[in-house]
Image (cartoon, grey):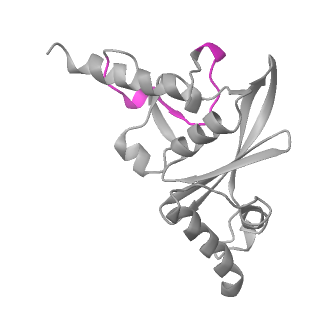
Amino acid sequence: MAGYFSPILQTFRLICASNGSLNIPLADACGRWASHAGDRKSGAMMDQYKITIDVDGRQDQATAFIDHFDSYIYLMIAVNGIRYEKLDHDCLSAFNFIRENCFADVTFLCNGARRNYVLSGMAQQAGGFVGYLVRLGQPSSLDDTGFIFDPCPRDEIGSVGEQAAFKTEWFQSMSGPA
């Protein structure tokens, strides 16, 4: 078994060394990792989540597959047979990369795409799966947290850029007058 995993682990080490960018065809690298995930030492399969999406005004579902590799999160999102993947330090960073660069025509209707979804440093270090749903002028609260792929209303969705702008605005709203 150790011999089987050597090439796969080497592939992921190359991906990690290249800043998480996956430039290897899915079938050559992560496809084998995903299809043989149950053969790993732990015997566990990759976590799988359904995400509600909107494509041209029609609701559908995407599937997110998540695995952990050393201090990295591997995320693969499949929409209607098309799969994109990203290896990153946290799930939200991987999700935002895929959202921004791979599925331009898809609106993900989940917390991770909310305009006001913010990760704390500790949440980011824990994998970026749970974030705060913050409001301007108010501190974050454990009562206002949400799992990245839990559904949310379409009118609360923002682009990756809008999320970053909102986070900056929220931080500034907390600092008070100078």
For the N terminus, the quadrant is bottom right
Provide residue 38's location: percent of width, then percent of height.
Answer: 74, 68
Provide residue 60's location: percent of width, then percent of height.
Answer: 81, 28
Whether the magenta-drawn stretch holds residue 5 is answered as no
Instruction: Please report the residue visible at 35 percent of the width from the left and 27 percent of the height from the top.
Output: 140
Let me know if residue 133 appears in the view.
no
Provide residue 147's location: percent of width, then percent of height.
Answer: 55, 36
* Front residue (pair 28, 155): 28
The quadrant holding residue 95 is top right
Residue extending furthest toward the left: 178
Residue bounds of the magenta highlight: 138-155
The vertical placement of 63 against 53, above or below, is: below
Instruction: Please report the residue visible at 41 percent of the width from the left and 44 percent of the height from the top.
Output: 123
The vertical placement of 168 against 120, above or below, is: above
Let me know if residue 178 appears in the view.
yes
Task: Judge from the rendering whether residue 9 lies leftward or rightward of residue 175; answer left or right.
Answer: right
Instruction: Please report the residue visible at 63 percent of the width from the left and 29 percent of the height from the top.
Output: 110
The vertical placement of 105 against 33, above or below, is: above
Instruction: Please report the residue visible at 59 percent of the width from the left and 20 percent of the height from the top.
Output: 157
Whether the magenta-drawn stretch holds residue 142 is answered as yes
The quadrant holding residue 87 is bottom right
Q: How many marks?
A: 0
Provide residue 35's location: percent of width, then percent of height.
Answer: 79, 64
The vertical placement of 114 against 90, above or below, is: above
For the C terminus, the quadrant is top left
* Front residue (pair 150, 84): 84
